[in-house]
Image (cartoon, grey):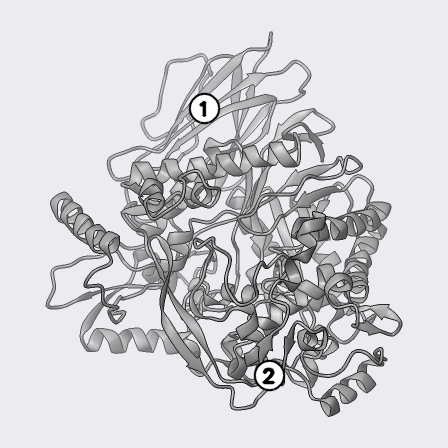
Amino acid sequence: MQVNGPWFIEPKTNRKVIFRGVNLSGGTKIPGGVPSHERNGYWVDYDRKVSFVGRPFPIEEADIHLQRLVDHGFNLLRLMVTWEAIEHEGPGIYDEDYLNYVIELLIKCKEYGLKVYLNPHQDTWSRHCGGSGHPGWTHTLVGLNPLNFPETNAAIVHNLHQNPEKFPKMIWNTNYQKLAAATLFTLFFAGKTFAPKCVVNGVHVQDYLQSHYIDAYIQLAQRVKKHNLQGDVVIGYDTMNEPGQGYIGWPDLTGRPSEDVDFKKGLTPTPFESMLLGNGVATEVDDWVFTWRGPKKNGRVLVDPKGIQAWLSTEEQYVVDQLFEWKRSPEWKAGCIWANHGVWDPFTKTITRPDYFNIEQQQNKNYGYYWLEFIKLYSAQLLEIHPDAILFIQPPIMERAPSMPSTLTNLALCPHWYDGLTLVKKKWCSYNVDYINLKRGKYGNGPLRFLRALRVGEKAIRQSFVDQIETLKLEGLETLGNYPFIIGEIGIPYDMEPVKQKSLVTMTMGWFSWLFVQLFDQFWKNKKDKRVTTRSKHATTNKKSKNKYYPMNSSEAPQNKAMDASINAAEQNLVSYTLWNYVPDNHPKWGDLWNGEDLSIWQGDTSISALIREELMEQSDTSSETLLPETITKARSDNNYNVNVRDIISLHRPHAHTVAGTPLSVEYISPTHKQQATFIFSFKSSLQAEGATEIYVPTVHFPLPAEVDTLSKEEDSTSSKIQVSGGQWKAQTHNEKYWTLLWWCDGDEADQELRLEGRIIQELL
């Protein structure tokens, strides 16, 4: 795979490639047998003996899963490989069984014609910071004790939460700003600048962490090369998933940046308050709630660790130093690193250097500078092994990408984009916010900017999504250059509130009343959350109510509308994307088995345990009536392993995989009971491209066209209708799930258009 301007190119044919991919998988964030909602097995022996072999699925099941992904039209996998999975036992000790497993999986991907780019995945540094990614020993290296994070608010961790079932929605993301993750990211990217005393085994901790991180992925890259998987399968490497900025550039440690649209939820200490809490000092901190216009301060809360510290004691640090064979410099004392560097005084409990992390701004060394220095080091070593690899550049989430050095030329920009309001609220609302452009300052300052960024109605919301991705795409052209743009993560939560049908008058009056309250901030009271949620297994309705909820496989289901709007935004911008995500063992109750997230496009009927079914039966015997989608009933009777309980309509859509020219436009109309599925694609044909334009077509909405001459006017009412502006087409069958439309356009270069019409929704999928 090559890059040429804003396009991925198939070298042998010079056809342009538009990737429709999927992340494989959120299930690789956790080792086998340690989901995020269970305490058992967490932080045992510093989590040195965990294993990620078989994550996301056993190699014996690879054929089932990879064929399923091909049937869904995916031609690219963003394969997640965590640093912890490779080097969990200790520095320089690599899990050979896991590395061999990854190679076996890549060999299987080759059999199915799937391209892969490898993603060094992390979220908020590690599982022990409430996220995923990096080894547990990195915490002990910098002197942190993960078992004390809950009391000190150094991180909010699902495994250690008092009530895992009530773990707050999306709160894991706030860990980026808390003591543990913020400290580790600061040390990783800029430790030599901000923590010069932290030297271990004669090496500064920044170099120690970065070298081990890079070496771990070099181990994988070497094996990819050894098994001849470069190019044909592995087309490149991601940099680091959603890297954190730590404290780098923080203007005042006693406060927060003036920008108030960044995500905040729950207890949100300032950096200085985090340092006090980390030292066991009772401290008042802000409490935040998430509203339509972003985070809103909800008061102050006293947090009392009762003397418990987030840091290892001198005795505990001695034990880990002996275990991992670390020899620290005499200046590196046990306890708070930042107190040791004079940022604050633990005796007077006062801040001494509130601008400590902002001094480098005067030398133009902001976070982007340090991030780029790491990228240079990382890419240089990877490209020595895989010179033709595409480097997938991922800036911090929702941030602009820094300008790249001219020495790096084989690049692709792969930011993440989510419909943030839906993701956090787990609800498809009749309003939304143009968040990216709001954050970029398009709507000015002051409270009225929220009104300017507000979008009401489905049409406006869908256009807002298109606009946001266009902004990211244009920023990439300005900073990165003329390179391909691929959305590394895009997806929806499936555990949304069920939606009932409302009249237009009711919706309009309700919305304006609600907006009035928000704008003037009067008579607002937090209400207890009485919402009924659904993952994919059922929808509920009270027997005394006439409210009826749309099942997930309805065209009116919120999941279907949200997914269609998100994918449409990518298609309208003619960009590649990898959906988040495919979790084979997604659970009806615990979702993706990580922090309460439930974004997997797949949930098999076999994953619905007897316990959950009993719970559903109990619900139906009490105050509510359980309505199971027809797919579940059918799957149970047929025991069909391949039935997807959450097989939403808009996920199945045509996609032009390879184009013999330059794509110009894509329009897809998702089917309803009244509207037939329609796909319109146009491109400018090229004489330099060889072969046909190949379009994946799902049979569920587009039955095979009639076997007639392409110039004939005969049509079959049960088949799809195809109209082309020129050339010839042919339907190539594969299996009952999909077929490929091959389209040849002979002659001069010209604009070409194809229209493909399918059928309406006649029955639930």
The kind of residue tagged 2 is Thr
Instruction: Please tell me the numbered disc located at residue 707.
Output: 1
Identify the residue at image location x=60%, y=36%. 476
Report the side of 519 relative to 731 (left or right).
left
Q: Is residue 441 above or below residue 11?
A: below
Q: Where is residue 276 in the image (x, y as percent from the top left)?
A: 56, 79
SS at mark 2 in the image: loop
Between the residue at mark 1 and the residue at mark 2, the CA separation in whole angstroms equals 84 Å
Q: Quadrant of residue 9?
A: top right
Q: Which amino acid does label 1 sit on?
A: Glu
When asked about the image quadrant of residue 437, the answer is top left
* Tally of marks: 2
Mark 1 lies on a secondary structure that is loop
Q: Which of 640 and 209 is in front in this view?
A: 209
Of badges 1 and 2, nearer the viewer stands: 2
Task: Tell me the tag on residue 488.
Answer: none
Residue sitting nearer the eye, 442 or 398: 442
| Residue at x 70% of width, y 67% of height | 85
**Vertical arrangement, residue 312 with respect to residue 78, above or below:** below
Q: Nearer the viewer, residue 474 or 678?
A: 474
Q: Residue 348 carries which label?
A: 2
For marks 1 and 2, the one nearer the N-term is 2
Q: Which residue is drawn at 49% across and 71% down?
A: 269
Task: Please tell me whether residue 378 is drawn above or below residue 622 in the rendered image.
Answer: above
- Residue 238 in sight from this viewpoint: no
Q: Position of residue 119 (x, y in %)?
A: 66, 53
Of residue 308 and residue 408, the one placed in the foreground of this image is 308
Disc 2 residue crowd, few under 14, some 14–19, many 20+, Cα 10 Å:
few
